[in-house]
């Protein structure tokens, strides 16, 4: 996926402990939205929400530090891999219906349903 | 109307003209109860919070047809734009997103929203962002004691479209 423009929607309060929404515009003018955050931010989320794990929701892209340079580097890596598959997956995750995976489970089961001779 | 009823009417409307009272006339229990209700109502009107909710038309809300959105003294909804209506409709079609928004609104109402959930949204000086997991809200902070105005509730992946459209409406 070719990147035309990268935009930061929010101000970064703490480069080591924060997350921000980033817009990644492709050559067709469509903007993908991903959240980029730090490991410390995930720890803080668990502490503040008094949980031992990050709850089930669209995963962030994790970076060591929320500097512009590192965020751009990470976004470029995600855009380059498989035509931006993992970036696009993050953007559209909430619109994917679980029935897609259930059907894949059925198909995958059938595909491997044979006896070794 | 007989004289007795005239007296009661005047009592229920203080300052509504000269009242004539008959101290010897017993007030039926039903009417006593009504008078008590009237007193309670007047008392509550002296509460500034109640005044803002019940008397000021400026605080009239627009929930974009989603009555499930809870009322609060901390915030109100002005989901008036086409963008706000479309965005909210999409959120409400997604059960998990809907649940997340309702929980976020409950936290806002009880003052339990975490600092990490409040952000400055670069594109709008007059709006702040409430950042949940997969959903976002843009809020216009209330002035002079007025409640905050929620102007849009949207799925995170609609952010670019929401921002572009609302730039025509908000600074």
Image (cartoon, rainbow, N blue to C red):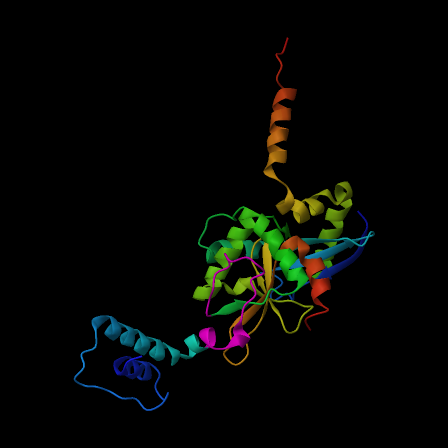
Looking at the image, residue A114 sits to the left or right of residue A25; the answer is: left
The vertical placement of B161 against A94, above or below, is below
The percent coordinates of residue A86 (x first, y second) are 69, 44
The vertical placement of B151 against A49, above or below, is below
Q: Main secondary structure of the magenta part?
A: loop
The percent coordinates of residue A23 (x first, y second) are 72, 57
Q: Is residue A65 among the parts visible in the rendering?
A: no
The percent coordinates of residue B43 (x first, y second) are 34, 79
Residue bounds of the magenta highlight: B52-73
Q: Which residue is drawn at 61% across and 54% down?
A: B89
Count the marks: how many? Answer: 0
Question: Which residue is farthest left?
Answer: B24
The vertical placement of B135 against B25, above or below, is above
Q: In which quarter of the image is residue A41?
A: bottom right
Task: Choose between B33 and B107: the one closer to the eye.
Answer: B33
Q: Quadrant of residue B1?
A: bottom left
Looking at the image, residue B108 sits to the left or right of residue A16; the answer is: left
Looking at the image, residue A46 sits to the left or right of residue A103; the answer is: left
Q: In which quarter of the image is the C terminus of chain A?
A: top right
Q: Which residue is drawn at 24% across and 75% down?
A: B32
Q: Is residue B103 among the parts visible in the rendering?
A: yes
Task: Choose between B162 and A15: the one closer to the eye.
Answer: B162
Q: Does the magenta stretch include residue A51?
A: no
Question: Which residue is farthest front?
Answer: B1
Question: Which residue is farthest bottom?
Answer: B18
Q: Is residue B67 magenta?
A: yes
The percent coordinates of residue B97 (x first, y second) are 56, 51
The vertical placement of B22 against A45, above or below, is below
Task: Choose between A95 and A84: the one closer to the eye.
Answer: A95
């Amino acid at each position: 996926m070719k990147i035309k423009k990268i935009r930061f929607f929010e101000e970064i309060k703490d480069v080591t402990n924060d997350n921000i929404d980033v817009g990644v515009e492709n050559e067709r003018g469509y903007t993908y939205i991903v959240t980029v955050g730090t490991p410390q931010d995930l720890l803080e989320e668990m502490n503040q929400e008094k949980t031992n794990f990050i709850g089930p929701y669209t995963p962030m892209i994790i970076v060591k530090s929320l500097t512009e340079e590192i965020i751009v580097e990470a976004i470029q890596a995600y855009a380059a891999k498989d035509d931006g598959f993992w970036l696009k997956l993050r953007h559209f995750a909430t619109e994917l219906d679980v029935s897609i995976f259930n059907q894949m489970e059925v198909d995958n089961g059938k595909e491997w349903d044979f006896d070794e001779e | 109307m007989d004289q007795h009823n005239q007296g009661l009417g005047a009592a229920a409307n203080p300052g509504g003209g000269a009242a004539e009272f008959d101290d010897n006339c017993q007030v039926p229990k039903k009417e006593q109860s009504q008078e008590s209700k009237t007193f309670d109502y007047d008392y509550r009107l002296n509460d500034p919070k109640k005044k803002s909710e019940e008397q000021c038309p400026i605080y009239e809300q627009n929930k974009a047809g989603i009555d499930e959105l809870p009322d609060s003294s901390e915030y109100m909804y002005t989901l008036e734009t086409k963008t706000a209506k479309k965005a909210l409709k999409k959120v409400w079609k997604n059960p998990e997103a809907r649940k997340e928004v309702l929980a976020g609104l409950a936290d806002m109402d009880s003052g339990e929203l975490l600092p990490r959930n409040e952000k400055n949204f670069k594109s709008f000086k007059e709006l702040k962002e409430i950042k949940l997991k997969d959903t976002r809200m843009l809020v216009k902070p209330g002035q002079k004691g007025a409640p905050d105005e929620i102007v849009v509730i949207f799925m995170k992946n609609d952010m670019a479209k929401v921002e572009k459209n609302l730039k025509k409406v908000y600074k």
